[in-house]
């Protein structure tokens, strides 16, 4: 190490704590009506979110105090395990179908989503691979294609579920990491063009994806079908105005807006807390990303720097896509808002990853 371990980044800790607290409050506010209707208990969702938050904070504390270099030794095993889980979840009778995707392993309401684990495992492995072979990254076949091949294989397995949102976040964070490692822009542009053609093919291959694109371009053409989610989301954001209707006063959560506690929770935040509340949350995410980038720049070694870039990329890409969907700037994709939306796998894994990021900050130069 370049220097002795110091205190973790205070700005990062404060932003994580505030975002997590806002998330717990808003999960309750957004889900209380739905939870009472479905389970007779308005605290149903927030109680489960609190359990995973406690587990996640415990994991954060552990990883924040465990030297991040130990994860370099576990990167290959973690990636292999996640590939096995992605295959197992596709087996009928084992993988659990929720929301039209066979992407869960578990019993009853408790389960894990292997694609969430793959995001972190892929970042760990790429950070190790590219730090060990950084001198080859400018070579197209020897340096760039092998890691991108792994990313493509994982993306393919995730798309078989299908789960475009998780796959897009993993690919986005991986490309940011690969770019930071020194890959040539010309190579990435070439592959990006090929990837765009592949994405178009994926959209055309599945009618429901094509309908999402048309619904995004003109939601009012089918207001009760493909355009329903985005229209209801905008109906929530609009009345929020500058200061919002007040905490707990959302009207759209009364069975109008689908998934108010998960994918579209930012709509409820904007409705209840207004432009000021939504902007404050975005600023907190910007602070978190800023401190993540600063940690990557000042990390004492290449592995730590690339790992910090990848973890920060996961947060940044996921926030960008979720809020983009909610405000109608992107087609509807099932993806949660980090540390805010209801979801045990996502919350626990993100807090674990942020603990690693905090540990890297303890060795910053």
Image (cartoon, rainbow, N blue to C red):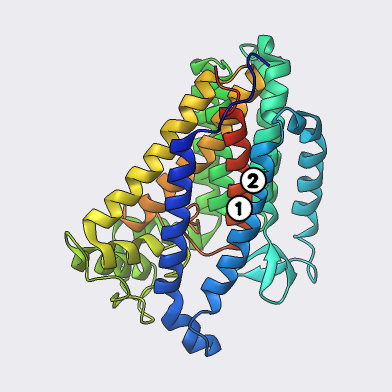
Percent coordinates x, y for residue 268 in the rendering: 34, 67
Q: Is residue 226 above or below residue 330?
A: below
Q: Are marks 2 and 1 in contact (CB under 8 Å)?
A: yes
Residue underneath mark 1:
57
Q: CA distance from mark 2 to mark 1?
A: 6 Å
Percent coordinates x, y for residue 305 in the rendering: 59, 23
Check the picture and name the quadrant holding the N terminus: top right
Camera sees residue 266: yes
- For residue 215, side relative to residue 156 (left or right): left
In the picture, residue 122 is in which quadrant? top right
Percent coordinates x, y for residue 313 in the rendering: 51, 36
Residue underneath mark 2:
61
Identify the secondary structure beneath mark 1. Answer: helix
Pick whichever, 70 or 219, lies toward us. 70
Pick whichever, 198 or 67, lies toward us. 67
- For residue 213, side relative to residue 186 (left or right): left
């Amino acid at each position: 190490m370049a220097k002795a371990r110091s205190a973790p980044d205070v700005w990062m800790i404060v932003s994580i704590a505030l975002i997590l607290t806002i998330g717990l409050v808003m999960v309750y506010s957004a889900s209380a009506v739905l939870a009472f209707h479905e389970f007779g208990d308005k605290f149903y969702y927030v109680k489960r979110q609190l359990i995973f938050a406690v587990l996640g904070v415990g994991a954060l504390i552990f990883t924040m105090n465990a030297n991040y270099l130990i994860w370099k030794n576990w990167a290959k095993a973690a990636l292999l395990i996640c590939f096995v889980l992605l295959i197992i979840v596709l087996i009928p009778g084992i993988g659990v179908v929720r929301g039209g995707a066979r992407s869960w392993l578990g019993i009853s309401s408790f389960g894990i989503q292997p694609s969430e684990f793959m995001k972190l495992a892929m970042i760990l492995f790429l950070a190790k691979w590219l730090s060990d072979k950084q001198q080859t990254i400018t070579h197209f076949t020897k340096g760039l294609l092998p890691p991108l091949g792994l990313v493509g294989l994982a993306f393919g397995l995730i798309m078989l579920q299908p789960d475009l949102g998780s796959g897009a976040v993993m690919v986005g964070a991986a490309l940011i990491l690969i770019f930071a490692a020194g890959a040539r822009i010309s190579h990435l542009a070439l592959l990006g063009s090929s990837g765009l053609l592949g994405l178009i093919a994926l959209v055309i291959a599945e009618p429901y994806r094509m309908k999402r694109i048309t619904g995004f371009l003109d939601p009012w053409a089918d207001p009760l079908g493909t355009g329903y989610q985005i229209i209801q989301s905008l109906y929530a954001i609009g009345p929020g105005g500058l200061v919002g209707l007040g905490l707990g006063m959302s009207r759209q959560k009364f069975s109008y807006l689908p998934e108010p506690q998960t994918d579209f929770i930012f709509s409820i935040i904007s409705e209840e807390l207004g432009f000021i509340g939504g902007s404050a949350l975005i600023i907190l995410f910007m602070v978190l990303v800023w401190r993540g980038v600063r940690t990557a720049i000042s990390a004492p070694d290449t592995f730590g720097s690339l790992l910090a870039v990848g973890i920060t990329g996961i947060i940044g890409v996921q926030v960008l896509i979720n809020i983009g969907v909610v405000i109608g700037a992107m087609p509807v994709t099932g993806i949660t808002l980090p540390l805010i939306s209801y979801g045990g796998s996502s919350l626990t894994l993100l807090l674990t990853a942020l603990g690693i990021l905090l540990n890297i900050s303890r060795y910053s130069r």
